[in-house]
Amino acid sequence: MMTTTLLAVTVVSMLGATDTIPAMRPPAVPLVTHDPYFSVWSCDDRLTDNWSRHWTGKVNALCGLVRIDGKPFRFAGPVPKEVPAMEQRALTVDATRTVYDFEAGGVKLQVTFLSPLLPDDLDILSRPATYVTFKAVSADGANHSVQVYLDITGEWCVNEPKQEVQWGRTDFDGGTALHMGTTEQPVLAKKGDDLRIDWGRVYLALPRQEGASSRIKLADLSRDSFVKDGTLRPADAKEPRRADDAWPVLAALLDLGKTGTEPVTRQAIIAYDDEYSIELMGAKLRPYWRRGGMDASGMLAAAVKDYASLDERCAKFDKELAQKLDSAGGPVYGRMCALAYREAMAAQKLAADGDGAPVMFPKENFSNGCISTVDVIYPAGPVFLLLNTKLMAAQMKPVMDYAKSGRWKWPFAPHDLGTYPLANGQVYGGGEKTEKNQMPVEESANMILLLGAMARKDGNAEFAQQYWPVLVRWAEYLAEKGLDPENQLCTDDFAGHLAHNVNLSAKAILALGAFSQLCEATRRPDDAAKYRAMAGGMAEKWVKMADDGDHYRLAFDKPGTLSQKYNLVWDKLLGLNLFPTDVARREVAHYLKSQNLYGVPLDNRKDYTKIDWLVWSATLAEKKEDFEALIAPAYKFLMETPDRVPITDWYDTKTGKMVGFQARPVIGGLFIKAMPTP
């Protein structure tokens, strides 16, 4: 749990201890978060400061107004400008929900955005519906008349506001919904990074409740009508029209009646039905929740029916996860991960393959738009390895199937499956045509390490067994090329090619150790011994080749250099024990001496770092106080960065400014400290 006010904060740990922690001002606050196309955030200190935005930065406007005894106030959005904003008293961000507390006119209004991203329930996880719940109670003991207004614009269902939209209304079991979508409906017709969805339909649904009504109106007319007399004019707007032509909105009015000292609650649901989510090797895939034939009406009916139980389950999940995180890394670490959780989940799309099995596709947000990038799956892995390895397998399966197909001819792992949302084959570097600008050691080691971690968590290697010939090929490649890598790219490709990469070498060695464990798990004892001995011998050479006094080098041939050796974390997590314990100890001691205001640089070449790798490197620490000392600057960065976007993983450790990337799946890597060790 992460709680802030605008002045100061005392955070109560979920373990029961009270810790005074500097108030986190999130760089962006998750509101409606489900997948790369349906991910909307508040990028300001107060929900009334500006419009909510899609993770790409484009406005996805949400307007919230309230009338208290006939006097209007704003709680979301910057208009109408003449209407005063409620005082925002507090903000709480847990793993699955964001809670704003407002006060004005003698009334306290709590607005909760609940995206029930429960990792152990794939039907619920994949259901694209966020509950927006309003709870009003008297602040002064008197009774007050309270009405709440909420609208969303056509920006939620277009790539560009100039696109034409049309709308309608549908009743479902348990309520009614307004919906809007583009006239064109270009299903899976575009691919790329800085894109928003322009097919399917966005829904503003109202469960059956007293005092609820809805209309499809033009923004100014709808909002002004509510401000003036607390009504929605009876006629809906005429369609179709461009989304930016007077801004048609889906609008809801919730009359809470007389509100006293007993809280009164009303609710709306914001949902999206994309109908088809991903194209995989030419086949259009349904979202996972649609695999059995469910449609939007069925999805909304299920959402209404399930709310009470989901509210309870999410509260339990949030509390238990917070306890686990606090116990593993302390309350600051817990707050960081609470903020990161929905970002990590909403950068993925859970679909169903032709057999109805789950397949999950991460998007490489604001780096190149690739889908199922292996060196994104790798750093994102800890959140899934910690919470549900079925989701890890769902990401690995499309990549492994591609790797064993006749199309992939190289002796190393692929980099990606295409450009989101089209997973039709690698597009990065030389792709399927040449070995140019591939990441051979990087991606092969990434896949083997993740498979090894999955097998350890599951207690078996059944998933890996399905792809054994492929894995042997990759292991042999690492055996030949891994100790002293050639001039090739690694996951930190923004830094350019680097030969003799010490951290990449460590990854290859540990991957061979993990492969030895997979051999053991699949009853291949001779192979297990062979690869274990190979990895051990390579580790001994690594220690001598990389030694630079009180730390280890960036590259074997570059004395006087340094880098984070975040890949060493697997020696600990997998119980490999290939490297002497003094290696990590010396590295951590050097990190503690090398910190800037906002953390340890990735290496000596630049002042920037990666927040995921920083937490991995901190996890090497044996002492809790050393771990906390290494992540405290990253927490400070989150509080102070001037870049108001969903957490960037790549930033300058001196200025706190974003270098690049935002809202990426790799933020799931922050959860690595909570992973169990043997």
Image (cartoon, rainbow, N blue to C red):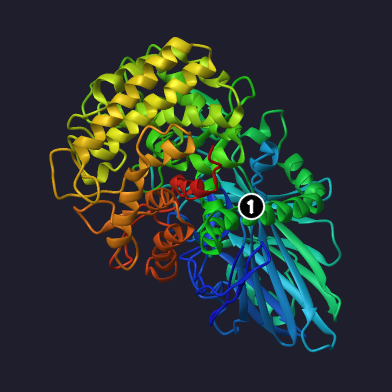
Q: Which residue is mark 1?
A: 321
Task: Check the image and report above or below for 562 versus 11.
Answer: above
* Residue at x 17%, y 35% (from the top left corner): 499
Q: Is residue 602 visible?
A: yes
Amino acid residing under circle 1: Leu
Give residue 91's position: percent from left, percent from top: 60, 71
Is residue 615 found left or right of 40 in the rendered image?
Answer: left
Report the label total: 1
Is residue 426 found left or right of 482 in the rendered image?
Answer: right
Is residue 55 found left or right of 72 in the rendered image?
Answer: left
Is residue 212 found left or right of 21 in the rendered image?
Answer: right
Quadrant containing the N terminus is bottom right
Task: Check the image and report above or below for 315 versus 521.
Answer: below
Q: Is residue 184 visible?
A: no
Task: Check the image and report above or below for 319 versus 303.
Answer: below
| Closer to us: 520 or 63 | 520
Give residue 135's position: percent from left, percent from top: 76, 70
| Closer to us: 9 or 100 | 9
Within 10 angstroms of label 1, few (less than 14), some, or many (20 or more) residues? Answer: many
Give residue 474's position: percent from left, percent from top: 35, 19
* Residue at x 67%, y 55% (from the top left corner): 318
Quadrant containing the C terminus is top right
| Closer to us: 272 or 454 | 454
Q: Circle 1 sits in a helix, a strand or a loop, which is it?
A: helix
